[in-house]
Amino acid sequence: MWAYGVSHTLSLIGSEGIEGLTIGYSADTEANLTGENAGEYKVIVEFSVIDSANWNTPENIEFVWNITPYTPDLSGVTWNYNTESPFVFGIENGKAKEYGVYLVGLPEGLEELVIYGEDTGRYSDAGSHITTFAIDEDSELRGNFGELVFGSGLDTRLVWEIKSLTVEKPEQKQNKVFRPEGYTFSEITNLPSDWEQYFEVTVLDAADNNIASENGTWKFLNVDQYRIQMRFKTGMNTANGGTTDNVKWSDNGRGAYQVTLKVERLIFDVNGWIDGTENMRATLDSDSVSEIEKYFDYVIYKREGGENVGDALAGNATLEYDTDYIIYLRLKSEYVGNVAVNYNGDTVEETAPYAFKTEADPLTNPPEYFYRKPVGNELTVSYEYTGEVINFEFGDWFVAEEYPPPSISDSP
């Protein structure tokens, strides 16, 4: 049976070792010892002997052999095109993609018999095309195949299309609130990742300053009002010097488009301050304390005689007992202009100072102030030892009738 790329060779066997006998082939049939295409081959074997006086010369032998045609299964042959997902105009590395259609799934060798007709080239512009195919029945290779039966779903005439690339318009007016990571160009515009192949883009701030791209894109980091202007490149559609609408907006628009992005300040509400206990600082009265602490620093100063004393203290500094302080919020430098708090009716990046005083150290007071009963669900009362000497006057601590010592029945 015929097989693509396979050569069949005929050889005479059993004549080896016959003394005095010479075997040859007729000049006009010797080439038929080898066959590549399907068909009938005839070979004439010729004999001669060394001593014709003492040996009879055998008669020539005519031998006919065949390579039968191959009948392939063509049920899986299809076009390389799916009408449900047509080709789409595109550009790669500055050059428009080219598309063409052809049959896939053909057995080896059969593609040489396929003749394509009508739109047989490769095309890049959006539009419709028609391509046909037929088998070259006159080819000398046709005999290598038996009956050629394609699947019932395969049409010999295909109407195919390169569709326009359509881009969804982004929301025209967008309001965002500042966030440290900013907003990317892609999430604001929703343009395809290779947008620079099709568009020219200009980005302006509120003062009409041109904002240059970085690594081919933009990130909107600060409070501002941005204008993102998008224009199709020349030749992309009929409104921009092209003969075909290769790229257009999804609403069939072909003109320039502008997105206005307003990034507003991130503002938190602060109700005020809550005095701390013992030697703890005042704390914020707000529902957003943890978020505020990401953007603001606490600034604390010790106060004496109505004046600040020494350097500013950190928000987690250990404070002295029975001492005057002020505390306020100051926006971290990297967020200036982008974050603020509503405080006392004003929107500010630094709050007015709040004055507070830490409580007296319980270990430095007379014993009658040092001891107290447990409150609420407390089982014990604990104090931190400061290293100072404490003189206990037991007679002043409590009256036994009020706090009798434990009895045996009270023991576990």
Image: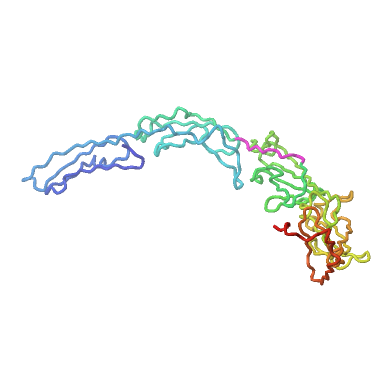
- Above or below, 25 against 136 in this view is below
Q: Position of residue 189 (x, y in %)?
A: 70, 43
Q: Position of residue 369 (x, y in %)?
A: 87, 63
Task: Give whichever of 368, 87 is nearer the camera.
Answer: 368
- Above or below, 385 against 402 in this view is below
Single out the residue that lies furthest toward the bottom. Answer: 389
Give the extent of the magenta segment. Answer: 163-173
Residue 169, quarter of the rendered image: top right
Q: Quadrant of the C terminus?
A: bottom right
Residue 389, quarter of the rendered image: bottom right
Q: Quadrant of the N terminus?
A: top left
Single out the residue that lies furthest toward the right. Answer: 305
Single out the residue that lies furthest toward the top. Answer: 152
Viewed as shown, does residue 70 lie left or right of 46? right
- Residue 165 counted in the magenta span: yes
- How many labels, in total? 0
Task: Give whichever of 341, 219 is nearer the camera.
Answer: 341
Single out the residue that lies furthest toward the front. Answer: 408
Please report the residue visible at 91 percent of the width from the left and 66 percent of the height from the top.
Answer: 304
Please report the residue visible at 80 percent of the width from the left and 64 percent of the height from the top.
Answer: 318
- Above or below, 388 against 110 in this view is below
Residue 30, quarter of the rendered image: top left
Colour basis: rainbow
- Residue 91 counted in the magenta span: no
Task: Give whichever of 64, 251 is nearer the camera.
Answer: 251
Q: Position of residue 16 (x, y in %)?
A: 16, 47
Task: Give whichever of 185, 400 is nearer the camera.
Answer: 400
Viewed as shown, does residue 227 lie left or right of 85? right
